[in-house]
Amino acid sequence: MQNGRKRLATTLSGIALIAVVGFVPTSSPAQAQPDIDDVQARVDTLFRQAEEASERYNDAKIELKQLRGELTSLQADEGRQDDTLEAVRSQVSDSVVRQYEGQSLSAVGQVVVSDDPQKFLSQLSTMSAYNDMQASLFDKYSAELKELTLRREATERRADQVSSLEKKLGTEKATIDKKLDEAQALLGRLKAEEREEILSRGTARVPSEVPASGRASAAIAYAMAQVGDAYVYGAAGPSAFDCSGLTMMAWAQAGVSLPHSSSAQYSSGPHIAESDLQPGDLVFYYSPISHVGMYIGNGLIVNAENPGTGVRVTGLHSMPYVGAVRPG
């Protein structure tokens, strides 16, 4: 656990260095030292807003992966339907040529060489001898063309959804960066000891042992080993995490697959009453849900909290509690 504290000290030192390097004295009158409680509240708000954007970003990545998979399937389906349509078209063309064999083929030629499937159908239906054609072939071609049109429209809609979601990801990432920059700028206005006081508030003593059994013990052991690691939005190890990235990787050690999203993890297992909490249960915060930690007993949780504090142990009710889930 000493290594965890060293990593936390390194994180705090890094923030302090940013503040020192970014401070340029001027000849203007010194500004009043900001009130530490006001800074605490504002920093907490900025970290909270950044994490909300980060979890929306995680949700969007999950949705984007699903949409891209659907788009690939639709494109493959469209390709197969295109091949089927072309095969039927060839049959229809051969039938037309055989029927008009020995006669003037000017009108027939226009039909056979048409590249546009819809135009092919239109020309075919207006031929003077249409009623004498093999009606089943014509109907089959018409039906296959409708199927292809439906598949193309579905593919275009899914492609539009992918493009829109990619833009949303960019917006959420910009929000994360903006809020984090604002928080670091506020911390930079404080003295080193005041910064450390803000960033250490709420930290609980790390228990020497967490009683757990079964698969939960593997998840807890992993999460506790990360205490002191950095918080990085969108990260899932090995040395930096966001809140849902930590719980996802912790439970992965126990063979349980969780999505990289706090709101999605809230739907990943049975909901547990607070009075029934056991070590290893996932606990969720804020409305809408945008933070998750792991219960370790005695009213404590381990969680990747924010960029200022990283992964640490804190109280169960250090944030607005919503509910709990038991994975596995």
Image: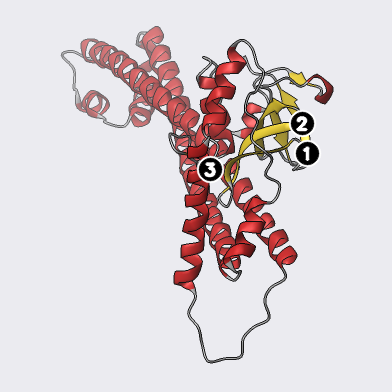
Residue 123 position, x and y percent, is 34, 28
Which amino acid type is marked by label 2?
Gly
Query: In this rendering, does residue 233 appear at all?
Result: no
Marks 2 and 1 sit apart, C-alpha to C-alpha, by 8 Å
- Real-space CA distance between mark 3 and mark 2, rounded to the nearest whole angstrom: 21 Å
Who comes first in sequence, dot 2 or dot 1?
2
| Residue 96, picture quadrant | top left
Question: In the drawing, does residue 230 fall left or right of residue 326?
Answer: left
170 vs 113, nearest the viewer: 170
Residue under the image location 53 percent in, 92 percent down: 27
To which residue does mark 3 refer?
5
Frontmost of labels 3 and 1 is 3
Q: Amino acid at mark 1?
A: His
User: Which residue is at 51% across, 38% downward?
Assistant: 2
Task: Tell me, yes or no, whether the two marked residues, 3 and 1, touch with CB atoms within 8 Å.
Answer: no
Seen from this angle, which residue lies furthest right? 275
Q: Nearer the viewer, mark 3 or mark 2?
A: 3
Image marks 2 and 1: residues in contact by CB distance under 8 Å: yes
Q: Tally the marks.
A: 3
Where's residue 281, x and y in %? 68, 23
Residue at the image point whose x is 19% and y is 23% from the top = 105
Q: Residue at x 58, y 13 (%)?
A: 215
Residue at which label 2 appears: 299
Is the residue marked by circle 1 packed among few (<14), some (14-19), or many (20+) residues within 10 Å?
few
Q: In screen coordinates, is 95 left or right of 173?
A: left
Compared with residue 195, is residue 216 higher up or lower down, i.e. above or below?
above
Tell me, for residue 317, which label it has, or none: 1
Quarter placement of the C terminus:
top right
Q: Which amino acid is tagged 3? A: Arg
Give coordinates of residue 9: x percent, y percent. Answer: 51, 50
